[in-house]
Image (spheres, coloured by chain):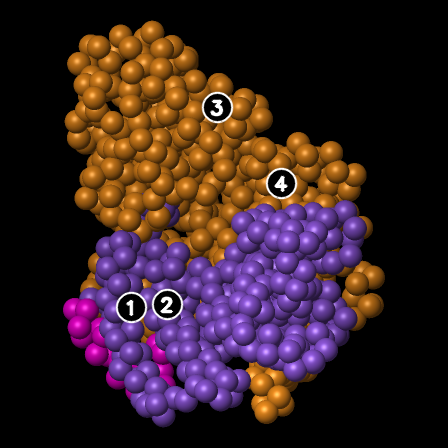
Chain colours: A purple, B orange
C-alpha cells in the first residue's frame, strides 16, 4: 500500500519533468503542421491561428496547468496533428500492442528460460557454448536487421508469411490469418528479449547450484532431478522475475522498430510519429501510460517476490 | 509451498493468454469482406503511402500523402496533367479576359456529390471564400488580387464581389489587378472543392480542426472515402456518381517502410509505389513489375544563406557550383536518370540560349574562390533533413567535391523543426532539398527567389533579393501577351543563372514501380499528383 502511495508523487514528478523536457525540445510544433518553406507557402495569420488553436500562444506554466486540470477529468487532450482525442488514439493501440508484446514476451520466456537452465546444467559443454554464441548473436544484432532478414527469408523466398500489417486487408477476420501476420514481428521482438533472458537464467541457476543447501539436499540422498527441479530452479527463477519486470517497459523501445518495419499499428509507431511531429499532447499521453506501466511493473515485481520467496516481506 | 513458488510465473503467462484471448475476438475489426462479384469487375488496387498522412483538408498545407488521398476523394476546377499542362476537371473549360482580370469557369453539368446532392457553382464559391480567409486557409495568398477581398477578410461583408455565380454552372473570378498566373496558382497543390451542404454551417474558424477532414466521406472525386485505419491503410470505394466512368472498384493505400514496400511489390501485395534509382533497376528486372519514370517538375538543389558572408559574394556561389561534379552525382546517385539545370526557370520557352553551363571545373572554382578571398578555415554547415537516400548520398559527394577545391563542409543532419528555426534565425549556411513545380508557368519561380518571399514570410530560404527580378516577375504576371511574358521570364532566367540564386544539382526522374496488372498508368513528374489519373486506370 505504501509503495502504491509513493508512486503518486513519482508520477506527478514525471509529468512536470516530461512537460518541461518536451517543450524544451528544439522545433516548433506549429511549423511541423504548417511549413512556410513548403512550396505552397502559408500566410502569417494562418500560422498564428493554428498556434492559438493549439494553446501554444500561452506561457508554459499555464499550458501545464490546463493539461493537469484536463488530466484530472480523465482528458489527455487532443493531438496537435489531427485533433483526435489522445485517449482514443492510445486506446486503439492497446489491443495491437498487447497482442504483439504479450506474444513476444511469452515467446521469449518459453524459449529463454529452458535454454538458460539447460546451458547452466551443462556448463562448459558444447550446448553451453552454442547457446552462448547464439544468445550473444541475438543480443548484438540490431532488430531492424533481423526483421528485414526475416521478411526476405520467410515472406519473399519461402512465401510463408505476409509482409506486414495485422491482417490481410479486405478479407474477413480469421485467426489463422492473424497468426500468420503476428508470427514474424512477435518472433523478432521476442528474440531480442530471449538473449538476455537466457544469460540471466544461466547465471542465476549457476549461482544457486553452488549454494550449500543443495549439497545438503544431495547429502540427504535426494535424486539429482529432484534436487534441481524442486530445490534449485524455483530459487533460481526469483531474479528472473525482476528481469521480466524491467523488460516490459523495454519492450516499448524494441517495438518502435519492429512495428515500423512490419507496419504494425501499435504504440511504438504512435510514439515515433509523435516525437517526429512534436505532437506534445500525444507524447505526454504516452509518457503517462508508460510511466504508470513501469511503476505498476515495479510494484507487481515486488509483490511477486513475496509470493515466490516467503523470506521477503514488503514493509 | 511449492505451489506458491510457481504461481507468479504461471499467473503472468496466463494473464498474457487471457489478455490475448480477450482481444482475439476483435482480430482485425477493420477488415471488411469484399464481395466476389465486385472483384470480378474492376478489382482492388493497393497503393503505397510514402509517409503517414495528417488530414485531408484542402484548405490546409498538405503532406504528399494527404495530397494523394485528396486527389482521389475530391475534385478540383483545374489540376495538373501528367504532360505538364493544365487539365479542366470540374470545369469543362475556362476563359480568361484579355487583360487577365476576369476568369470564367464553365462547370460540368449534372455532376453529383458522392451522397447524391447536386454540385453547383455555389459549392465553388463556398470553397473559394474559405480559401481566401487567411486564418482558415494556408492558400490565401493565391487569391490576394480578388475584388472585394479586403472587405471580406476584414469581416465587413460575408460576400466577395469578385466571386460571382451567374448560374449553377458558371463561376466567375474578378481581380482588382491583372494576374495571368492565377490558373497556375490554382492548379497546384491540388485544391479540392468542398461540399457546402455538409460544411456550410460549420464556423470557418473551427474548420481546421473539423473531424470531416479525417474522414471526408462526401466528395466529388472518383473514389469515396470509406475509412482510415491509422498506421495501416486507407480504404476507398469507387464513386458511382463520378462524372467520368471509373473501372477500379476499390483502393487500399497502405502505410509501410520503403524497403518493405519493395518486398511487398515483389510479392504482389502492392500494385504501385514510388521508388528511387537505387531500387529501380532491381525492381524493373522482376517478372511482374515495371518501372515508369517522368522528369521531376522540381529541382534538387542546395540553398545557401545568400544574405550573409561569405555567400553574399556571387563569386563564392559560382565557385561552389563549378566545384560540384553534377554529372557525377546524376550517374552515381540517380543511375543516370536525370538532367542538369542552370537556372531556376524551367517553363517551356523561358530558358534562353547561352546560359553559363557551370560544367564541373575545380580549376575555375579555385580561381573564383581566390578572387573572393575565401577563408580556407571556414567550415560550411550543411543542415538538411536526413532520410532521403538520394539526398544523403548527394551531400557526401558534394562534401568530397568541395574538399577537393579546399572548401570544408560539415554535414549536420537536422530535424524539420530545428531546421526551420535555423532558416528563420539565419544560422544555417547551406541546406539541401528538392521540389517545386517549375515546368508550366514561369511565375512559379517567384516563390523561391522574390524578395517579398524571404523566409518566414514565404519560401525564399536563401533570402536572395534583386529588385530587378521582382519587377520582371510582377510585369509578367500583369500581362497576358505570351511572347512578351516569355521574354521577361528569359531575362529572369539569365539573372538567376549569372547570380547563382541556388546551387541547382539536377532534375531527377520521378520513378514508379508498378505491377504489370495495372494498365493505363501515366507517370507524373510530381509524385504527389500521380493518383489524379486513377479514374482511367484498369486492373487485369
Whole-angstrom CA distance, mark 4 to mark 1, is: 42 Å
Q: Is residue A231 above or below residue A167?
A: below
Looking at the rendered structure, the secondary structure element under dot 4 is strand
| Residue closest to the eye, A64 or B10 | B10
The residue at the point 50 percent across, 73 percent down is A239
Asked which quadrant contains residue B451, the reply is top left
Q: Are marks 1 and 2 in contact (CB under 8 Å)?
A: yes
Which residue is identified by label 1? A18
In the picture, the quarter occupied by the N terminus of chain A is bottom left
Whole-angstrom CA distance, mark 4 to mark 2, is: 35 Å
The region drawn magenta spans: A59-77
| Residue B518 visible from this viewpoint | no
Q: Is residue A189 above or below residue A244?
A: above
Looking at the rendered structure, the secondary structure element under dot 3 is helix
Marks 2 & 3 on one chain: no
Where is residue A180 drawn, in percent x and y?
73, 65
Whole-angstrom CA distance, mark 2 to mark 3, is: 40 Å
Taking the magenta stretch, the answer to whether it contains residue A69 is: yes
The residue at the point 29 percent across, 16 percent down is B406
Whole-angstrom CA distance, mark 1 to mark 3, is: 44 Å
In the picture, the quarter occupied by the C terminus of chain A is bottom left
Which residue is identified by label 4? B512
Whole-angstrom CA distance, mark 4 to mark 3, is: 21 Å
Q: Is residue A61 left or right of residue B460?
A: left
Q: Give the chain of mark 3.
A: B
Asked which quadrant contains residue B462, the reply is top left
Where is residue B263 drawn, in percent x and y?
68, 47
Q: Are marks 2 and 3 in contact (CB under 8 Å)?
A: no
Which residue is identified by label 3? B329
Which badge, 4 or 3, is on the more N-terminal residue?
3
Where is residue B29 drawn, in percent x and y?
65, 76
Which residue is identified by label 2? A283
Amino acid at each position: 500500500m505504501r509503495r502504491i502511495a509513493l508512486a503518486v508523487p513519482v508520477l506527478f514528478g514525471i509529468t512536470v519533468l516530461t512537460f518541461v523536457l518536451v517543450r524544451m525540445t528544439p522545433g516548433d510544433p506549429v511549423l511541423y503542421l504548417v511549413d512556410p518553406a513548403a512550396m505552397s507557402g502559408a500566410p502569417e495569420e494562418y500560422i498564428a491561428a493554428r498556434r492559438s488553436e493549439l494553446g501554444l500562444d500561452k506561457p508554459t506554466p499555464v499550458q501545464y496547468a490546463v493539461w493537469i486540470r484536463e488530466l484530472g477529468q480523465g482528458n489527455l487532450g487532443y493531438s496537435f496533428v489531427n485533433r483526435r482525442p489522445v485517449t482514443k488514439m492510445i486506446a486503439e493501440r492497446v489491443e495491437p500492442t498487447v497482442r504483439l508484446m504479450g506474444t513476444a514476451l511469452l515467446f521469449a520466456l518459453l524459449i529463454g528460460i529452458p535454454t538458460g537452465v539447460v546451458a547452466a546444467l551443462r556448463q562448459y559443454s558444447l550446448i553451453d557454448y552454442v547457446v552462448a554464441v547464439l544468445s550473444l548473436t541475438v543480443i548484438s544484432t540490431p532488430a531492424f536487421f533481423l526483421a528485414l532478414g526475416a521478411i526476405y527469408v520467410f515472406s519473399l523466398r519461402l512465401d510463408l508469411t505476409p509482409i506486414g500489417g495485422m491482417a490481410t486487408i479486405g478479407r474477413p477476420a480469421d485467426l489463422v490469418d492473424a497468426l500468420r501476420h503476428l508470427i514474424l514481428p512477435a518472433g523478432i521482438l521476442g528474440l531480442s528479449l530471449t538473449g538476455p533472458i537466457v544469460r540471466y537464467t544461466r547465471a542465476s541457476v549457476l549461482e544457486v547450484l553452488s549454494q550449500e543447501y543443495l549439497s545438503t539436499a544431495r547429502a540427504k540422498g535426494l535424486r539429482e532431478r529432484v534436487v534441481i527441479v524442486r530445490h534449485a530452479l524455483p530459487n533460481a527463477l526469483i531474479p528472473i522475475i525482476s528481469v521480466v519486470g524491467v523488460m516490459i517497459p523495454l519492450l516499448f523501445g524494441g517495438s518502435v522498430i519492429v512495428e515500423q518495419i512490419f507496419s504494425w499499428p501499435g504504440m511504438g509507431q504512435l510514439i515515433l510519429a509523435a516525437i517526429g511531429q512534436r505532437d506534445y499532447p500525444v507524447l505526454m499521453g504516452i509518457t503517462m501510460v508508460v510511466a504508470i506501466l513501469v511503476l505498476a511493473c515495479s510494484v507487481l515485481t515486488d509483490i511477486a517476490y513475496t509470493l515466490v520467496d516467503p523470506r521477503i516481506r514488503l514493509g | 509451498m511449492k505451489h506458491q513458488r510457481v504461481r507468479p510465473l504461471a499467473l503472468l503467462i496466463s494473464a498474457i493468454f487471457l489478455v490475448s484471448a480477450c482481444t482475439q475476438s476483435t482480430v482485425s475489426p477493420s477488415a471488411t469482406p469484399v464481395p466476389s462479384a465486385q472483384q470480378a469487375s474492376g478489382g482492388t488496387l493497393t497503393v503505397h503511402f510514402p509517409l503517414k498522412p495528417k488530414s485531408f483538408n484542402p484548405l490546409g498545407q498538405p503532406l504528399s500523402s494527404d495530397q494523394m488521398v485528396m486527389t482521389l476523394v475530391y475534385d478540383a476546377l483545374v489540376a495538373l496533367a501528367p504532360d505538364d499542362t493544365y487539365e479542366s476537371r470540374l470545369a469543362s473549360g475556362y476563359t480568361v479576359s484579355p487583360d487577365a482580370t476576369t476568369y470564367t469557369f464553365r462547370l460540368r453539368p449534372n455532376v453529383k456529390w458522392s451522397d447524391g446532392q447536386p454540385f453547383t457553382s455555389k459549392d465553388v464559391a463556398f470553397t473559394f471564400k474559405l480559401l481566401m480567409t487567411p486564418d482558415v486557409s494556408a492558400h490565401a495568398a493565391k487569391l490576394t488580387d480578388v475584388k472585394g477581398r479586403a472587405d471580406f477578410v476584414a469581416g465587413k461583408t460575408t460576400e466577395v464581389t469578385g466571386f460571382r455565380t451567374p448560374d449553377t454552372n458558371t463561376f466567375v473570378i474578378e481581380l482588382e489587378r491583372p494576374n495571368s498566373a492565377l490558373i497556375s496558382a490554382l492548379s497546384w497543390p491540388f485544391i479540392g472543392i468542398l461540399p457546402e451542404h455538409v460544411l456550410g454551417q460549420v464556423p470557418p474558424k473551427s474548420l481546421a480542426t473539423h473531424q470531416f477532414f479525417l474522414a471526408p466521406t462526401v466528395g466529388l472525386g472518383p473514389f469515396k472515402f470509406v475509412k482510415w485505419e491509422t498506421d495501416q491503410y486507407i480504404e476507398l470505394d469507387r464513386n458511382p456518381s463520378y462524372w467520368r466512368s471509373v473501372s477500379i472498384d476499390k483502393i487500399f493505400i497502405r502505410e509501410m517502410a520503403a524497403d518493405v514496400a519493395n518486398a511487398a511489390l515483389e510479392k504482389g501485395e502492392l500494385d504501385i509505389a514510388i521508388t528511387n534509382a537505387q531500387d529501380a533497376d532491381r525492381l524493373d528486372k522482376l517478372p511482374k513489375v515495371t518501372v515508369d519514370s517522368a522528369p521531376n517538375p522540381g529541382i534538387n538543389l542546395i540553398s545557401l544563406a545568400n544574405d550573409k558572408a561569405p555567400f553574399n559574394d556571387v563569386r563564392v556561389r559560382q565557385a561552389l557550383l563549378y566545384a560540384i561534379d553534377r554529372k557525377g552525382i546524376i550517374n552515381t546517385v540517380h543511375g543516370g536518370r536525370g538532367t542538369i539545370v542552370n537556372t531556376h526557370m524551367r517553363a517551356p520557352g523561358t530558358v534562353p540560349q547561352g546560359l553559363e553551363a557551370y560544367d564541373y571545373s575545380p580549376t575555375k572554382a579555385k580561381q573564383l574562390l581566390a578572387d573572393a578571398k575565401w577563408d580556407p578555415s571556414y567550415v560550411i554547415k550543411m543542415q538538411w533533413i536526413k532520410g532521403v537516400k538520394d539526398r544523403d548520398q548527394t551531400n557526401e559527394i558534394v562534401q568530397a567535391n568541395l574538399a577537393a577545391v579546399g572548401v570544408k563542409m560539415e554535414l549536420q543532419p537536422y530535424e524539420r523543426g530545428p531546421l526551420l528555426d535555423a532558416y528563420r534565425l539565419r544560422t544555417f549556411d547551406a541546406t539541401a532539398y528538392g521540389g517545386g513545380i517549375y515546368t508550366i508557368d514561369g511565375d512559379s519561380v517567384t516563390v523561391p527567389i522574390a524578395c517579398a518571399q524571404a523566409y518566414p514570410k514565404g519560401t525564399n530560404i536563401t533570402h536572395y533579393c534583386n529588385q530587378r527580378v521582382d519587377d520582371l516577375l510582377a510585369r509578367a504576371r500583369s500581362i497576358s501577351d505570351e511572347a512578351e511574358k516569355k521574354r521577361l521570364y528569359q531575362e529572369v532566367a539569365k539573372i538567376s543563372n549569372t547570380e547563382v540564386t541556388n546551387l541547382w544539382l539536377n532534375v531527377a526522374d520521378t520513378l514508379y514501380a508498378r505491377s504489370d496488372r495495372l494498365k493505363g498508368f501515366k507517370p507524373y513528374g510530381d509524385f504527389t499528383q500521380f493518383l489524379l489519373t486513377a479514374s482511367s486506370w484498369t486492373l487485369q
